[in-house]
Image: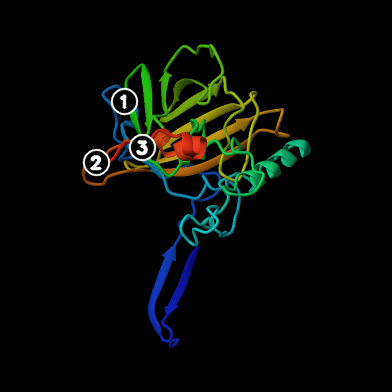
Amino acid sequence: MTRVRAITNVAGCVVLAMVCVAVEWPAGQGPPPQTQIPRTPDGKPDLNGIWQAVNTANYDLEDHGAGPSPLLLAGAIGAIPPGESVVEGGRIPYRPEALVKRNENRKNAIPGKPGRNLAADPELNCFLPGVPRATYLPHPFQIFQSQKVIWILYQYSYARREIPLGTSTEAPYESWMGWSNGRWEGDTLVVDVTGFNDQTWFDRAGNHHSDALHVIERYTPISAYHLMYEATIEDAKVFTRPWKLAMPLYRRIDRNARVLEFKCPELVEELHLGQYRKVTPTR
């Protein structure tokens, strides 16, 4: 597919032409040959490094247009950018009553809206983001890989995961990030995640789940610098059927790239405590 786009100046004169070529692989065929994928000494793909999603999924997993800033008087700062759905088929298959709750979540997620539920948006409150949302927050994350364990350290709010490879174990308790068990299927890292509570959302648009959530993640390298990320979502309390989201992840190759400290709890003290927050004396 080829798109030609002309950009004009105010007078209407053509000043630049851009050609964008999208290569589509034939139906029924797999990804391009994986000849340059770095590997560990045991032959597995080497996923060590810092990765980041580059999309608008954290605003809304489904198609959405640009919108005003949820910070009300902030103008264009913080405004919602337009984005395309990362959900297979375009729409999340909600049960009718669960869709009603999603719509209520969406109304309550607007900071400053009279009568809103302060606890509505988990990200606003600096709660752990859950899975798969931790993957496509606008923050990088780092993968550490060994033969027996995968660790993922997220920049957002000290979130982290330990993913043992091999024998699966049951979740000992419910939590925001769930309980992960990993295995290799060829060059794909498959992570089975259970043991969630119902306190996280999939995005800022109020898409939600119950404590019956079951997520199967798939990390597939397609080059030395790209992973294809897929997550299959199962939750019979909320959805009529399992559904899938997918997106590429990009290896950060910036000079001195690293995961920095994002002290999220300190940023919500004003929101939660107001005049009762701790004030650091100034000289």
Sequence-first disc among 3 and 1: 1
Residue at the spot of label 2: 283
Left or right of 81 in this view: 140: left
Please name the residue shown 49% across and 39% down the image. 274
The nearer-to-camera label among 1 and 2 is 2
| Of 18 and 29, the residue lying toward us | 18
Q: Amino acid at mark 3?
A: Phe
> Is 109 drawn above or below residue 75 in the view shown?
above
SS at circle 1: loop
Q: Which residue is mark 3?
A: 262
Q: Which sits earlier in the primary sequence, circle 3 or circle 2? A: 3
Mark 3 is surrounded, within 10 Å at the Cα level, by few (under 14), some (14 to 19) or many (20 or more) other residues, namely some
Q: Secondary structure at mark 3?
A: loop
Tell me the mark number nearer the camera, choosing from 3 and 1: 3
Q: Residues within 10 Å of mark 2 (few under 14, many from 20)?
A: few
In the rendered view, tell whether residue 146 sits above or below residue 131. above
Q: Residue furthest left?
A: 256
Q: Residues within 10 Å of mark 1 (few under 14, many from 20)?
A: few
Quarter of the rendering containing residue 184: top left
Of 93 and 122, the residue lying toward us: 122
In the rendered structure, which disc, 1 or 2, sits on the residue that comes first in sequence? 1
> In the structure shown, which secondary structural element does the residue marked by tag 2 occupy?
loop
Q: CA distance from mark 1 to mark 2?
A: 58 Å
Quick one: 198 or 20, which is closer to the camera? 198
Q: Amino acid at mark 1?
A: Gly
